[in-house]
Every structure is written in structure tokens, then in C-alpha cells.
Image (cartoon, grey):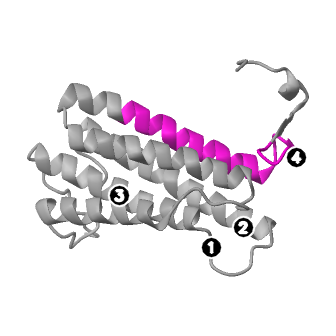
Amino acid sequence: MDIYTKKGDHGSTSNLLGETLSKADIILQLQGDIDETNAYIGHLRATISADHPNVIIDRSLRNCQYSLFRSGSDVATKFNKEYIQTSDIEKLEKSIDEMTSKAGELKNFIYYNGTISATMCQVIRSVVRRSERTFVTVLQYLEWEGDFPIGYQYVNRLSDYFFTLARYFNFMQGVNDDIMKLV
């Protein structure tokens, strides 16, 4: 596979359907948001392997990266084929439940701080939230009718996963939630 094709030199590219799209197209914005999330997860994986190696979390993050790759394929085919499955969402929910059972239920709004890994999770969570907003814009652009694609549901749950993972990293390092107060 060639790294450069020179096809994008004039501001366009093609999707998996063979359609030519402007690089300013909202669909490509969503793919970029997903790609950015995936890159940040790779950075987090490097961080945690240095800070506190955890094979289970690393495997979970690798699965997130693979699912995001497949989600990008969903987008590139305009959801004509869905590569994300309900089981991908169920894995995230199981992880969220397991981490919450250890770190404790959230009872307050909290500041996004703590360990390096935890704060990186909050950065990823915010990028995922942007992806969610872009996702809805894409579905409106496509005049989507009916239930949202499973890929959207996955992205929605992914932000919950990273919020919970941040709390879990802090918990593992003995850092308490920093509760927000309005006073």
C-alpha cells in the first residue's frame, strides 16, 4: 500500500464506496474525530505501560482502538454495512460496571484531575464527546431515519468508559475524586 497517492492534493478523497468527497465534508470530519480518538488511545496505552502496566486494561484499550477502526469503516460506507456490533457495547458496559464496583459509585460532579493516565482519559473522553456531536450532525446530513446506528451507541458508551477509566486510574493510585462545589 502506498503512503501517498497524490489524490488528495486538490482537497478531495474517496470513501469505501468509491465516492469522491471534499476533505471539508462533515463525514470526513467524523472520521477525523474517530481517528484522533484512536491516536489518543494509543498515547494512553504507551503512558500506562510506563506508569502502571496492566495487561487487562491494555487489552481493553486495544479493543477500543479496533472497534474505532471498524466504526470508521461504518462511517466510510455511510452505514450501509455496520461493523460495530452490540457485543462491542456490552464489553464496554461490563468494563464500566467492573471499574465502578471497585472505584465506587459517583455521587457528585468531579474535577478532571489526578494521575497522568486519568487526565489523559478525560482528554480522550472530551474528544469522544466531540465525535458524538459530529456523529449526530452526519446523521442529520444523511437525513437518517429510525434508530441511530450501533456505531453511534458505541461512541456514546465510549465516553462513559473513559470517564470511568479515569476514576479507576485515580482509585488505583490512591487519588480521591476531587468533588466540585458551587460555594
CA–CA distance in space, label 4 to label 1: 23 Å
Q: Is residue 159 magenta?
A: no
Q: Do callouts 1 and 2 mark residues in contact (Cβ within 8 Å)?
A: yes
Q: Mark 4 or mark 2, which has the lower sequence index?
A: 4
- Residue picked out by circle 3: 161
In-front residue for pair 51/70: 70
Q: Do callouts 3 and 2 mark residues in contact (Cβ within 8 Å)?
A: no
In-front residue for pair 149/180: 149
Label 3's element? helix
In-front residue for pair 1/31: 1
| Residue kind at label 2, given as amino acid type | Leu
Query: Picture coordinates of residue 109 (x, y %)?
Result: 29, 67
- Residue picked out by circle 1: 148
> Which-is-in-front pick, marks 1 and 3?
1
Label 2's element? helix
> Which-is-in-front pick, marks 4 and 2?
4
Q: Mark 4 or mark 1, which has the lower sequence index?
A: 4
